[in-house]
Amino acid sequence: MIDELYSARILSLAANLPHAGRLPAPEGTGERVAKLCGSRAIVDVVLDDQGRIAAFAQDVKTCALGQAAAGVLGQSVIGATAQEVRDARDAMSAMLKSGSDGPEGRFEGLRALRQVADYPARHASTLVAVEATLDAVEQALLKHHSDTRTGLAGAA
């Protein structure tokens, strides 16, 4: 059963982590840690004028499952809105907890992790990168909103 969990597809996704590292001047940073196993993801983002992710970097220290999720995320995240990331997180959580189909559209690749549903102890580590990304985007949106209200938009 464990061999099924760590399939060649999962290991391939885990080995290819797009946008690894940190951004020099992020507008938003999110960090999540899975308490059970210590898996950690730190995500930096910069948004464009439309509130879409224009720059993204991730520092991920997780098991292969978390790395695989971060790999899918890194392949698809540029151009995403906060709502798309939120929908992906919600759909992925539902996929793991209640057997739903999983994310659609831009983040459909996260469905490769569907078999993690049978391993509740792995759910949190599988979600850390997506949750950290959502935190980073929401922080950046608050900064954009604040800059617009104070007349600092585009003053960077």
Image (cartoon, grey):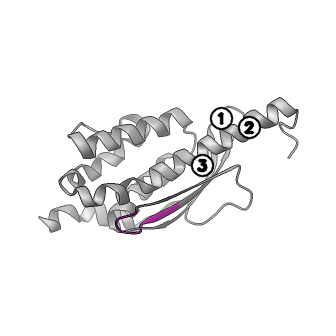
The residue at 84%/39% (across/down) is 154
Question: Disc 3 marks which residue?
Answer: 136
Q: Using the image as rendered, state which of residue 77 and residue 116 is in the foreground.
A: 116
Badge 3 density bin: few <14, some 14–19, many ≥20, Cα 10 Å = many
For this rendering, which residue is in front, 145 or 110?
145
Q: Mark 2 to mark 1: distance in Å? A: 8 Å
What residue did someone put label 1 on? 51
Mark 1 surroundings: few (<14), some (14-19) or many (≥20) residues within 10 A: some
137 vs 107, left or right, is right
- Quarter where residue 59 is shown: bottom right
Residue type, numbered disc 1: Gly
**Cβ atoms at labels 2 and 1 below 8 Å apart:** yes
User: What amino acid is labelled 2 in the image?
Assistant: His
Q: Position of residue 47 (x, y in %)?
A: 67, 42
Nearest the viewer among 35 and 16 is 35
Tell me: residue 14, above or below residue 130: below
- Depth check: give the residue in front, 30 or 64: 30
Stretch in magenta: 35-41
Say whether residue 76 is visible. yes
- The label on residue 123 is none
Q: In this orientation, does residue 75 appear?
A: no
| Farthest-out residue, front | 35
Left or right of 137? Residue 71 is left
Q: Give me the residue at 50% from left, 61% from top.
A: 41
Which is closer to the viewer, label 2 or label 1? 2
- Which marked residue is nearer to the observer: mark 3 or mark 1? 3
* Dot 3 and dot 1 residues touching (CB under 8 Å): no
Residue found 43% across the figure and 35% down from its top? 87
SS at badge 3: helix
